[in-house]
Image (tube, helix red, strand yellow):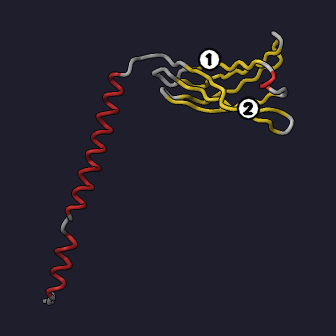
């Protein structure tokens, strides 16, 4: 039979008790998980089935060696994800189309945005630049 010293009993008892701070952190964690689940369920059942509505906005134009890059943001104001979003940029001067560029964004979730860029040979600041989403696929 082994003997325990009084210090061992206190150390063992103190190691197995849950402190008040631990209970508070556990309660906050549980509340956060419950809130997240309730929010996701609410969002899933109340979100209208609005199709994707992609709006493309110019963010910046920068000169890079030998060409210009037009950076843009594509925002999905709709309620469903858009996949393979085709973004087109057209550069017009004097009523004539000078350059047309396009790129594809893999996906743009509902109520979010994704960015990208289009390269032009001529300076887009010298003409009229038109950016638009031309189409998407349903994932």
Helix, strand or loop for disc 1: strand
Viewed as shown, does residue 25 lie left or right of 111? left
Does residue 16 lie above or below 33 as drawn?
Answer: below
Residue name at image x 31 percent, y 28 percent: 42
Image quadrant where residue 63 sits: top right
Residue lying at 81% horizontally and 14% vertically, measured from the top left: 97
The residue positioned 50% from the left and 22% from the top of the image is 77
User: In this picture, is 122 found above or below 48?
Assistant: below
Horizontal side of 5 relative to 138 (left or right) equals left
Label 2 secondary element? strand
Disc 2 to disc 1, C-alpha distance: 24 Å
Residue 67 point in image, percent of width and height: 83, 33
Q: Position of residue 99 (x, y in %)?
A: 81, 20
Q: Which residue is mark 1?
A: 135
Res 137 → quadrant:
top right
Q: Nearer the viewer, residue 113 or 107?
A: 113
The part of the image, by quadrant, that contains residue 7 is bottom left
Where the N terminus falls, by quadrant?
A: bottom left
Residue at image mark 2: 61
How many marks overall? 2
Crowding near pointer 2: few (<14 within 10 Å), some, many (20+)?
A: some
Q: Residue furthest front?
A: 126
First reached walking from the N terminus: tag 2 or tag 1: 2
Q: Position of residue 123 (x, y in %)?
A: 82, 27
Is residue 116 visible in this depiction of the protein?
yes
86 displayed left or right of 21: right
Residue 117: tell me if it is visible. Answer: no
């Amino acid at each position: 039979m082994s003997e325990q010293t009084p210090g061992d009993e206190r150390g063992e008892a103190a190691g197995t008790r849950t402190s008040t701070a631990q209970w508070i952190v556990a309660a906050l964690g549980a509340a956060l998980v419950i809130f997240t689940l309730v929010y996701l369920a609410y969002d899933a059942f109340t979100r209208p089935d609005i199709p994707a509505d992609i709006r493309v906005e110019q963010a910046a134009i920068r000169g890079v060696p030998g060409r210009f890059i037009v950076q843009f943001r594509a925002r999905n104001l709709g309620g469903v994800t858009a996949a393979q979003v085709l973004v087109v940029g057209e550069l017009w001067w004097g009523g004539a189309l000078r350059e047309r560029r396009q790129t594809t964004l893999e996906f743009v979730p509902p109520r979010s945005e994704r960015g990208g860029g289009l390269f032009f040979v001529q300076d887009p600041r010298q003409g009229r630049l038109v950016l638009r989403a031309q189409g998407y696929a349903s994932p």
